[in-house]
Amino acid sequence: MLGTLCTMDKDRSHKGAQQTRMDQYTTQSTGGSLQKDSPSPTGKGDEPTGAQIFAAIEASRQAVQTQIAAMVVDVNLLRAEWRVVAERWVAPEQQVTCLQIDIDTLKATVAILETKTHKLEERAEDAEGRARRCNLCIVSVLEGVERKALEAFLEE
């Protein structure tokens, strides 16, 4: 478990952090640097002392804290970039909404104008037909009252 906690990825670590593995390296108490275990002259490996283990854990803790601080900075940068992108999208979304409202208004206006145009076309066609036939339009007289003698009806 300690080896897993203390192993750091070099690509993600920042300046000053060193890759460590508890199963391969131990910390010397003098310089705090990490050295490879070397077999002892007796053939038995030297067991790390409690101070060496504590120093290795402390170095790993500091490296993890450094990585966390770097990640916090990265997250804050991403949040700032997201705000900028979100602000960019606000204006176009508002414009699209306004354009949709304008389109709906124009569609309603076009429908009204089409109705008026149709009525005007009918009136123009009726006026052209009357102009060609030279007909009289008598208002307020019921149709069929004249009974085949239109001239006599008009003279009365």
Image: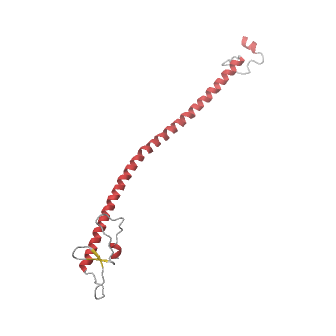
Q: Nearer the viewer, residue 140 or 89?
A: 89
Q: Is residue 80 visible?
A: yes
Q: Nearer the viewer, residue 115 or 90?
A: 90
Q: Is residue 156 visible?
A: no
Residue 151, picture quadrant: top right
Residue 148 position, x and y percent, is 78, 18
Quadrant location of the N terminus?
Answer: bottom left
Work out which residue is located at the far top of the displayed protein and give it: 155
Residue 95, picture quadrant: top left
Residue 4, picture quadrant: bottom left
- Is 151 above or below relative to 93? above
- Residue positioned 62% across, 28% down in the render: 119
Residue 46 position, x and y percent, is 28, 84
Quadrant location of the C terminus?
Answer: top right
Work out which residue is located at the far front of the displayed protein and give it: 41
Work out which residue is located at the far bottom of the displayed protein and give it: 42
Rendering colour mode: secondary structure
Q: Nearer the viewer, residue 15 or 84?
A: 15
Q: Nearer the viewer, residue 45 or 132?
A: 45
In the image: residue 144, left or right of residue 35: right
Residue 147 position, x and y percent, is 77, 18
- Is 134 above or below relative to 91? above
In the image: residue 97, left or right of residue 67: right
Residue 60 position, x and y percent, is 29, 71
- Residue positioned 21% across, 75% down in the render: 30
